[in-house]
Amino acid sequence: MDLHELTIHQAEALLKKREISSKELVKALLERIDTFDDTIGAYLTIDEKGALKQAEDADKRLADLTPDAYAADDAPPLLGIPIALKDLLCTKGLKTTCASKILENFVPQYDSFAVSKLKKAGAVILGKTNMDEFAMGSSTENSGFKLTRNPWNPDHIPGGSSGGSAASIAACMATGSLGSDTGGSIRQPASHCGVVGLKPTYGRVSRFGLVSYASSLDQIGPITRDVKDAALMMNVISGHDEMDSTSADIDVPDFTSGLSMFEKNGLKGMKAGIPKEFLSVKGLDPDVEKAFMNSKKILENLGVEIIEVSLPHTEYTIAAYYVIAPSEASSNLARFDGVKYGFRDKTCDNLIDMYKKTKSKGFGNEVQRRIIIGTYALSAGYYDAYYGRASKVRSLIMDDFKNAFKQCDIIISPVAPTPAFKIGEHIDDPLTMYLSDIFTLSANMAGIPGISIPCGLSSKGLPIGLQMMADRFDELSLIRAGYGFEQNVNLSMRFPDLKNLG
C-alpha cells in the first residue's frame, strides 16, 4: 500500500514502529496534491511549508518517546497524522475564507476549538479545503473561487457543502479531514465520494471558531477512509468548551470502544428502524434503492432486527429547515458589512451604498438568496408566521425521533436519493438541489448523530452511502453498527482510479 492510501490507524501504527516518518507521509500527500488537485480542486489553501515544519516537529516528538510510552499508549493520538480542514474552521495565521470573496484575504488570529484539539493531539495541518460558500449548498458548485470535482468521475459533483474535505479523502490527498454539517454537509459528500462521514450530536463538538451558517444546526465532524478513523478523530475533537454556550458538558466516551463492542458481541440484539415515510420519498434512484435493500440484508445477516418506525412530521422537514437555516444565516452574516474586516467595495458614495455594494459583490448568488429568504422570514409581522412556526415543527420532529428510538437502537436510510449528479445539472434549480438533502436534514433538526458509510456503487460506478442515525449522544451505537457493517459490505473498489487525471 502506498503512503497516501494509509488510514489514520495504519499510519499511526507505522509511525509508532518508526517504519515511516511523518515527513515522508506528508511529502507523499503533497506530491499527490501537486499531481491531481489541479483537476479535483479539493484545496483552497495548501500550507506546504507549515505542514513540513509540523511533520519535522512530530518526528522529533516521536523519536523522543520511549518504548514504555508507546506500550502505555501515551503518545498523542494523532501525532504526525496529516489532516485537511474545511475552510470555515479558523486557523491562526492561515487563511480562512469560507470559499467567499468577502473573506478572500481573512487570516484569523486564533484557532477554532476543533483545530486546537487537533494540534494538541499532534496532527499536521495540510491545508484548507473547498466548500460551498459559507456552507450553503449541496454540491460545492457555490464556491466563490473554484469547482471541486468528484474523484470517482470528474464530470460529477463531490457533494456539499464539505465537498473539498470528502474529495481530499477519496482522492487520497489527506489522511483525515474535518467538515461541518448543517443539513447533511458531512454525510452527503461522504456518500457521493465513497468515504465515511460522521455528524456528531449537536453540542458534542464545540463550534467555537467555526464560522457559522446556522448556529442551532451546525456541527463539526470527521470525514475519513473508515469507521475506526472516524472514532479516533472523534476522541480528539469532542469535549466541553466554555467558549461555546451550546457545548454539552457531558462525559466523552472512548469512541473506539464501539469497535470493541462489535468485536466482542457483534450486532446481535440491535434493532434498526426504517422510517416508512422515507421509503415513500419520490425520485429515489433505483441504484440507491438496490444498495439500501442490500445493506438491510447485510445488517439482518449480522443479527440486527429490522423494524418499521414512523417519523410522521418528515414531510414538513425541508420547509421548516429552509426557514430556520436561512433566518439564522441572515443574522450571522450581517456582520460581513465591509466595516470591521473582509472585503469592502471602495466605489461607494456613502455608508448605505457601501453596505449594498460590498454584500452584492462579496456574496455569491446562493448566499444572497438565503439571506433574502431569512431576512424576510425574520421581518416585522412575519417572525411568528415563519421562524416561530418552523421552530415548533422542529420540536415535533425531535419528538418523532424520541419516540422512534424507544423502539430501536439506530435508524437506517439512504443518504441521498440519487448518486452524485453531473456538474451544472441542478445549479439553476435550487428546489431540486434542496430536495437532495431530504434524508439528512432531519438529523440536524433533531440534533442527533448520523453517519454515512459506503454501501455500494451505482451502475455508472459512482459511490452510494448508507445512513445510520442514533439517539442524542449515542455515537457509540453508530460506530458499533457502522464498523460491523463496514467489515461485511463487499465493495469491489476502495479508491477511485486517478491515473488518467495527472
Image (spheres, helix red, strand yellow):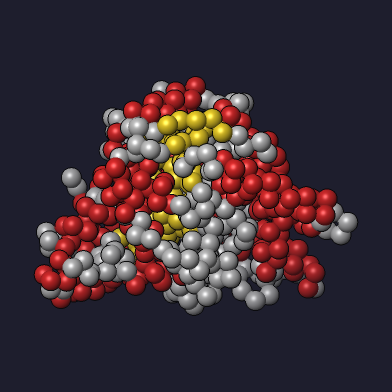
Q: Who's the residue at 52% across and 65% down the image?
A: 248
Q: Position of residue 275 (x, y in %)?
A: 56, 33
* Badge count: 0
On screen, residue 262 versus residue 466, left or right, reads left
Q: Is residue 376 visible?
A: no
Q: Who's the residue at 37% across and 67% down the image?
A: 118
Q: Is residue 324 visible?
A: yes
Say above or below: 54 vs 84: below
Pick the front one: 193 or 403: 403
Pick the front one: 191 or 92: 191
On screen, residue 248 versus residue 259, left or right, reads right
Quarter of the image holding residue 490? top left
Q: Who's the residue at 72% across and 47% down the image?
A: 393
Q: Who's the residue at 16% across and 57% down the image?
A: 14
Quarter of the image holding residue 332? bottom right
Q: Position of residue 270 (x, y in %)?
A: 40, 39
Pick the front one: 152 or 212: 212
Q: Position of residue 445 (x, y in %)?
A: 62, 49
Position of the N terminus by quadrant: top left
On screen, residue 81 versus residue 321, left or right, reads left
Pick the front one: 119 or 275: 275
